[in-house]
Image (cartoon, rainbow, N blue to C red):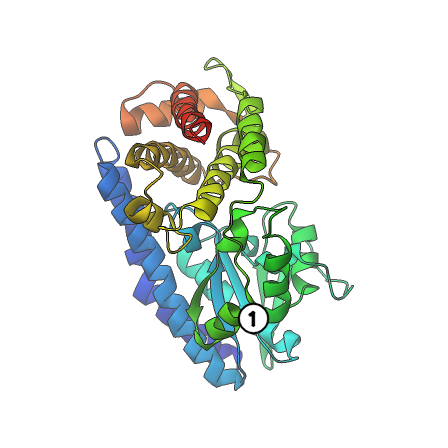
Amino acid sequence: MNLEKYNMIKDKFISSYRDKILGLREYYEFKIYDISIEEFNMLNRKYRNYIIEMINELGCIFKDAYNTDFCIALSGSLARNTNNLFSDIDINYLTILNNFETIIDIEDKINYILQEVLKFRGKDKLHSMVVYLPLIDNKKINAIENNEYILNFVDGKIKVKCRENAEQLMYQTYNSTRNIYDVVKYFNKHDNEFNINEWAYCFKFIFNKEYQKIYREHRNEYRKSNNINIFIDNLLNDIRRDDTYLDENTIHIENAYLKHIYKTTVLFNFYKLLAIFYRIDKNVSSFNIDYFFKESIMLDKHLFNLFNEYLKIIQDLQLILDKKDIDLSSHSNIIFNINNINEIYKVLTDRENILSDLNIKKKKLYDECIMILRRF
């Protein structure tokens, strides 16, 4: 595929999808003052479905263009249906062939189109879970000035920018396996009577679902109750230890620290709770929050309402930062002025202090989690 044809494909997808997807954010901002949880979920479902639709179309195009076999699977929030309108895309390109360089080239080129459609600020907003597996190579990646990477074509190249502090992630990305058997083995290793990890249950095949048969044949999901009381006690301790609530009069806070306090840790603990109940609640047929909501006989609907309320205020924060051309990021040391954020928060929601609201929602969610865990 030459550069001209690639740009034609990219422009077609921008024309077909960008306004529809980014329009969801505009609609949310318009309705933010009184939007219901049902409509909030509906918007995030539309966002997710548009992305899946694009991935399927792009997979077909690039499979034909490269005449090679691969699959695409989602992990993270888009696989467990907990995404919001600003979520990263955890996307995995896997194969049974020994053609990793080709797969990585396809991965880079599809991801760049997705990045452009969604107007992501860096290629690292799309990443694969394979970076957590043992590296299989030690290739040096030639990042040029300003943390940019190259898409090569026979007749030209494109420079693709990453966000700050993404060099290690890019090194891992280009030196990781793309073999589906390696991924399944990794999941099995971290999903057993001694280990419980929600991400081991969270894998959704999107393109070329023939690979799902391989996954199901070799993936040994552990759904027994061995050591479940230990996992419950550990999670209770983790929740109790997470007692950081910023004073509502805080003025300055680092981006990475804000995300750690109110997004990363809280959501990690909530998903760990889901993993515990996925083991013991056999009524839940798939690790997906919609299945938990519909099928669980152990988890009350109130828990999911509290979670969605919390996710909504995280989305409010990300909307405000997006207006400032900033991502909520674990890798960013930018210092936020909370007073400036609250000024926008007031205009959008007619509420005074986002830290106060985050604290209230976080405590309510945690209190409910503690109450549920104590029952068992």
Between 168 and 342, the one lying in front of the other is 168
Q: Is residue 372 left or right of residue 201?
A: left
Residue at 48 percent of width and 81 percent of height? 63
Is 24 above or below relative to 240? below
Q: Is residue 255 something one can see in this rendering?
A: no
Between 76 and 269, the one lying in front of the other is 269
Q: Is residue 242 left or right of residue 348?
A: right
Between 339 and 205, the one lying in front of the other is 205
Residue at 61 percent of width and 70 percent of height? 181
| SS category of the residue bearing label 1 | strand
Q: Position of residue 358 (x, y in %)?
A: 41, 25
Residue labelled with disc 1: 94
Q: Position of residue 214 (x, y in %)?
A: 52, 74
Q: Amino acid at mark 1?
A: Leu
Q: Position of residue 317 (x, y in %)?
A: 41, 33
Residue at 31 percent of width and 35 percent of height? 300
